[in-house]
Amino acid sequence: MVLTIIAVLMGLAFPSFIESLRANRLASTTNLTLATLAYARNEALRAKSGSTVCPRGADGTSCGKDWNAGLLVWTDDDRDQTFDAAEVRRTLEPSGNIAISANNVDLIAFDHQGRSTSTTPRSLRLQPDPCTPGQHQVRSISVGAIGQASVSKETCP
């Protein structure tokens, strides 16, 4: 009888525990991504040369195409507008079970005044894998023209 009660309680608690872990992982990945964007913007202001956030390449020290591979922050210290491994300031490891996607965004760049170099907002979308349909488990991070990042919550498709 006691084992049956324990089994029922575990059956009820386990899905809630999994959702809690998923929510914590999403929150921490969102916060790390926001902190990385803020760091890049501050580096652009400090260095007076601009900085860029891009997806990490396969070697970990160059820009790639897949945002799920982690993030890379670099400054254009020599002002040649090309990536140099010596200009890498920070790397962010990929987050387990959180998918990061960006529609037509290969990088997020800031000028020497901390403004976005893009005339349109740059957005990253973070969601757990798997994403429970109808749940508010998606975070959209948008970097506007003045360089500030904002977060909005969305539901899983």
Image (cartoon, grey):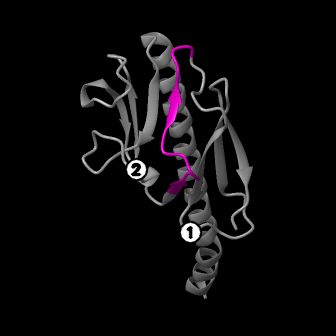
Marks 2 and 1 in Cβ contact (< 8 Å): no
Tell me the kind of residue under disc 1. Pro
The residue under the point 65% across, 32% down is: 119
Q: Nearer the viewer, residue 150 or 128?
A: 150
Q: Quadrant of the C terminus?
A: bottom right
Residue occupied by mark 1: 130
Task: Decide whether residue 107 is among the magenta residues.
Answer: yes
Quarter-of-image position of residue 156: bottom right
The residue under the point 45% across, 30% down is: 52
Looking at the picture, does residue 99 appear above or below residue 14?
Answer: above
Tell me the kind of residue under disc 2. Pro
Q: Which mark is residue 94?
A: 2
**Secondary structure of the residue carrying numbered label 1:** loop
Quarter-of-image position of residue 88: top left
Task: Decide whether residue 134 is among the magenta residues.
Answer: no
In the picture, measured across the screen, residue 135 lies left or right of residue 6, that is right
Measured from the top left, where is residue 63 in percent x and y? 36, 42
**Secondary structure of the residue carrying numbered label 2:** loop
The residue under the point 61% across, 88% down is: 1
Magenta region, residue range: 99-113
**What predominant SS class does the magenta segment belong to?**
loop
The residue under the point 72% across, 58% down is: 136
In the picture, measured across the screen, residue 74 lies left or right of residue 148, that is left
Which residue is situated farthest in the front direction here?
80
Measured from the top left, where is residue 74 in percent x and y? 38, 28
Q: Which mark is residue 146?
A: none
- Which tag, 2 or 1, sits closer to the chain's start? 2
Looking at the picture, does residue 6 appear above or below residue 137?
Answer: below
Counting labels gives 2
Looking at the picture, does residue 51 appear above or below residue 56?
Answer: above
Measured from the top left, where is residue 16 in percent x and y? 64, 66
How many other residues sit within 10 Å of disc 2, few (<14), some (14-19) or many (≥20)?
Answer: some
